[in-house]
Amino acid sequence: MTSAPTASLTRLPRTDLEVLPLNLGGNTFGWTSDRETSFAVLDAFVAAGGSFIDTADAYAAWAEGSEGGDSETVLGEWFEARGNREEIVLATKVGAKPSRTGLSAANVEAALDESLERLRTDRIDLYYAHYDDEEVSIEEQVRIADGLVRSGRVRHLGLSNFSPERMREWFEVATREGLTVPVAIQPHYNLLARAAYEKDYAPIAREFDAAVMPYFSLASGLLTGKYRTKEDLEGRARKGMVEDNLTEDALAVVDVLTEVAATHDAEPASVAIAWLLAKGTTAPIASASTPEQLPALLAGTALELSAQDVAALDEASAPFA
Ligand SMILES: NC(=O)c1ccc[n+]([C@@H]2O[C@H](COP(=O)([O-])OP(=O)(O)OC[C@H]3O[C@@H](n4cnc5c(N)ncnc54)[C@H](OP(=O)(O)O)[C@@H]3O)[C@@H](O)[C@H]2O)c1
């Protein structure tokens, strides 16, 4: 594994948190990466200057025999083994763990304490509502989340997978009531999923000065260029996440990604991340199943695309915009 040059740190708006603009995805820990491999990925990420880790209490509940909590448990063991919790900016999420669904006050209180226990820490740096809970009014959600911050167990708030209308309402209510305003949103955004973010969520992030951490930065691996046919997906853990996206339009994007990458002597995955940064996002989220996959992700943070590169990628991905 070679080390890759990386970008300088970026500050999350309205916080004192400074991070390398790559948010390491944690849904692999305890799923496609066993404990030892997870530790190796985490060690390599930190050695390269990374500090920002994204997980959720629900990860990886979809894996056979799992009830969720696996990723947080691995992370907690790693913090303890390395004694490095203070050096990490830790994001986790609430609302989707099968035994702790929803955003009611009682559920969120219990879920947070369970996350802290698994993570072997006393605070979360960035706590996201993973999904909206339409049975809980936005006023109530804002009040509950503000209480978590006031308790000292949560430093900052974030929102993921809300409708644009309910997300906007969240920011408006928190601002109007003088309660804790989220500092980040986590949208599904990449070269094959552009429309919702660009039309509906980017304006909200701009208006309320929120950081943007796009998830599925690599379209679950499709934007690394390693899947060209349905056969390439056989036996792969992410088959179900990739197969519907493996279309002619998507492969045309991968072709341009590969061409642009070649002109920079880079990997397509690096260009996919560089494009998200060129679009003004704060720290794209991508995961690595092995330490060997990491350098391409890290290199994306330092890769400067020309206006021509971005225009070519925009044009190829126009069917998704
Ligand atoms: N808020 C939400 O609702 C939400 C939803 C989804 C994800 N997320 C977050 O976003 C993170 C990223 O999502 P994701 O991991 O599903 O998708 P992703 O980042 O788009 O894809 C990552 C996967 O691509 C493959 N890969 C990465 N680097 C590679 C390389 N250099 N060469 C070849 N293959 C490479 C690996 O999978 P294989 O080794 O299996 O091929 C890796 O696990 C998650 O961990 C999670 O933190 C959030």
Image: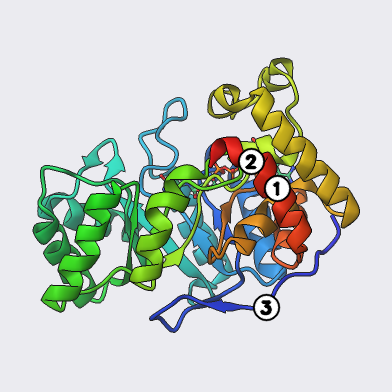
Dot 1, how many residues are within 10 Å of its Cα: few (below 14), some (14-19), or many (20+)? many
Tell me which numbered mark, 1 or 3, is placed earlier along the sequence: 3
Tell me which numbered mark, 2 or 3, is placed earlier along the sequence: 3
**Label 2 close to label 3 by CB (< 8 Å):** no
Q: Is residue 166 left or right of residue 300?
A: left
Element at badge 2? loop
Pointer 3 residue = 8
Dot 2, how many residues are within 10 Å of its Cα: few (below 14), some (14-19), or many (20+)? many
| Residue 23 picture location, percent across and down | 56, 60
Q: Residue at x 59, y 22 (%)?
A: 243
Give the answer, above or below, for where 223 lies relative to 88. Answer: above
Q: Is residue 211 left or right of residue 78?
A: left
Q: Nearer the viewer, mark 2 or mark 3?
A: 2
Q: In the image, ligand 1 is in what quadrant? A: top right
| Residue 182 picture location, percent across and down | 30, 68
Which three-letter amino acid code belongs to the residue tagged 2?
Ser
Q: Nearer the viewer, residue 289 or 317?
A: 317
Q: Residue at x 35, y 34 (%)?
A: 67
| Residue 29 picture location, percent across and down | 54, 46
Q: Is residue 259 left or right of residue 17?
A: right
Residue 317's label in the rendered image is: 2
**Label 2 close to label 1 by CB (< 8 Å):** yes
Pointer 1 residue = 313
**Residue pushed farthest bottom?**
16
Residue 125 visible to an observer of this rendering: no
Element at badge 3? loop
